[in-house]
Amino acid sequence: MTELVTLHRRVLTLASISAMLLAALAPALLGQRVNAAQLTSRKVTLSTSKVSTAATHTFAFTIPVTSSLGSIQFLYCTTPLGTCTAPTGLSASAATLGATTPGTFTLGPTTANSVRITRTAASVTGPFAASVVLNNVTNPSTANETFYPRITTYSDAAYTTIVDEGVVAGSTAQQLTVNARVQENLEFCVGTTTVNDSTTSVAADCNTVAGSTVDMGVIDSSTTSITPVSTNGGSNSNGVAMVRSNAANGTVIGYFPELNAASGRLKIAGATCVDNTVTTDQCFNSTPTRAVFAANSERFGMTALPVNIGSTGAYTTANLARDAAYAGDGTNVGAGGGFAWDDDATTAVTIASSAAAAIKVLDDEALVLKFAALAAATTPTGAYSVVSNYIATSTY
Amino acid sequence: MKGMALHRLTSSLIGTLALLLLAAPVFVLRQQAMAAFLDNRSVTIASPAPQATTTHQFQFNIATAGTLGSIELEYCANGPLIGTPCTAPVGLSLSDASLSAQTGETGFSISSSSTDNKFILTRLAVPAVPQTASYEFSGAVNPSATNQSVYVRISTFASEDATGPRIDTGAVVFSTSSGLGTLLYVPPHLTFCVGITVSADCANAQGNGMQLGELSATAPRVATSQFAGATNDFNGYSVAIFGTTMTSGNNSIPAVGAPAASRPGSSQFGINLRANSDPAVGQNRTGIGTATVGSAYSTPNRFMFLSGSRLVSSSLATNFNTFTVSYLVNINADQPPGIYSTTATFLATASF
């Protein structure tokens, strides 16, 4: 019985010694993780989530308690725990070290999925907000994939004694491209208007431009009549052409008269016209260059007032520029006055264009068209008319 | 378990969406690459009139090098977006149109697969180079609405029948518009004025009486007046004079019945419309018109007077002329004393 008790005691003693020995060896067997704490308030910020792209990874974490800090490891894994598998495509081999807090670290060994940095070990008073910037880390090659950098701090400079640990997560993302297209736009209209200047709005938009005839009433040789004519049967209106276009290469507005009996002159329908010097045929003479109508002459012509932007909301200076032949001031006086009419035009004659402007798009810019006529003493009696067609050509 | 122990992950999942936002209002999510744009593209129409049969000329820069076999030009009323439903403009007809000119990438003809609102140009598929190309179609009929925007969607293809992937694309826009009519009325006119003096355009006429002073048997007495006229009557106008000779009660100075020279000492009353030297009085016609003096009154130094006779006339529409009437009075020694006078009336006539 005594031998059995003695044996029992020897066994217990042996067990205790073994336990004590195991406890002493435990830190060594477990990688010296005794007392390792969690890094708190930790995150990684990626400069880009685009796959397979060199990025900057900015780590921020709080060292919770005062401890010695000599080195740090960043180990990229596909999982936060367990065996570390490197994310496919990720490469930290060429990583460089950016700013670090606390103090100055130097770049240590790097592998495809790990980066180590080191310094002379020194105490850090916790809690301490630390940060490490790693540049030129190539993101994993799979889109929308989460990866887990595991952060380990060491008290020594040789990555031996673990102090604190923590895991953060980053993710690549699918690039999303949104394509949008502004459709080509051209809204052009021709009509009549009572507006007789360059600032009063002609109409809110083309939907409200109407009218098809400008009546100049009775014309004689005593004076040049200029629209709007409100007496002797005049319709008190000018013509108007308004345009809206987003053509980046500009828009040209032109006109040409409809031919009647092979002539585009203001005439009695069906009449045969002689040349532009005769005043006894049933056709008004005209010139394609702007000119003041001389007394006792016979003339018909048109001009466009300075471009009207009364309906323009997008800017304050017109982008259309008038052609010189149609850039009169609306009077029959001086160098700024005069009218033109190209009765021989078989293709559109340019009245105005935005092609030369710095900004070529047009927001409801309008040309107020003024017509002028002076009869000669010999201009035959009768009703005279001409129809003009207007075209807007946009280059996108 | 600390370190790698299980714990609640406070992962900061960071993902960044890269948005390439261009513009509103239409958004298209795409996974595949887009066709290139046809730059500097335009359409020029010869006539904007609704329903006009006219010419449509397209011009654009071919952007992509490679095989080119066909070009599609689709006319739509509802918008330019290629690949979306196209509503043909009402009244538009391309069926009878022809390809009248082509530059740049050439050798095309209109495919039989073309429709009333779509041209398909086809050729043997050959490599194309980036350059400016133009295609003119004659005999296209415009849509019937006025002030309508028409969108033409343009696509190039490697295939010869406009099937398969689009290489380059773009849209252009043109607008129909009705013509603007300009009207006026020129009334018939006969402008005529009489006075001692008149301005060339009858803007002014001054005076209506002449004083010849004391008549003499040894020297003529003379005076002048003027008149001017113009008309747009195709047949012109004429002027006649009406009145009596110089009369004082029952006494009168005889009117010269036929053109005759001045004879002091013989009682004469006559006129002419010329510059005279004997006596020195009057001047010739002035002005750019075509009216001329009648033969009875057109000889210098010869005078007559016949009431109702024609002084001047023009056989066609004429601008202004100014005429000076010279009056001549001679008396003989036996002419009874008195105050002699006459009233001359000038009548201008035109028939429209």
Image (tube, coloured by chain):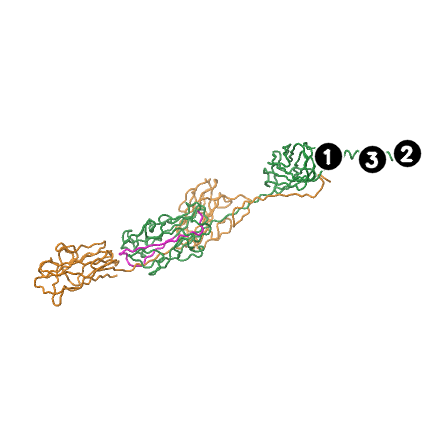
Q: Nearer the viewer, mark 2 or mark 3?
A: 3
Can you say whether A168 is above or below A327 in the image? above
Can you say whether A222 is above or below B41 in the image? below
Tell me the green chain.
A
Decide: few, some or many residues near mark 1? Use Cα within 10 Å; few <14, some 14-19, many ≥20.
Answer: some
Q: What chain letter is assigned to the residue under label 1? A: A
Judging by the rendered image, the residue that carries numbered circle 1 is: A32
Q: What chain letter is assigned to the residue under label 2? A: A
Q: Which residue type does callout 3 highlight? A: Ser
The part of the chain drawn in magenta is: A360-389
Q: Going by the image, does A125 lie left or right of B323?
A: right
Instruction: Indicate which disc, 3 or 1, sits on the residue closer to the N terminus.
Output: 3
From mark 2 to mark 3, how far is it between C-alphas? 20 Å
- Same subunit, labels 2 and 3: the answer reads yes
Check residue A16 in the rendering and tell me which mark sits there, or answer none. 3
SS of the residue under disc 3: helix
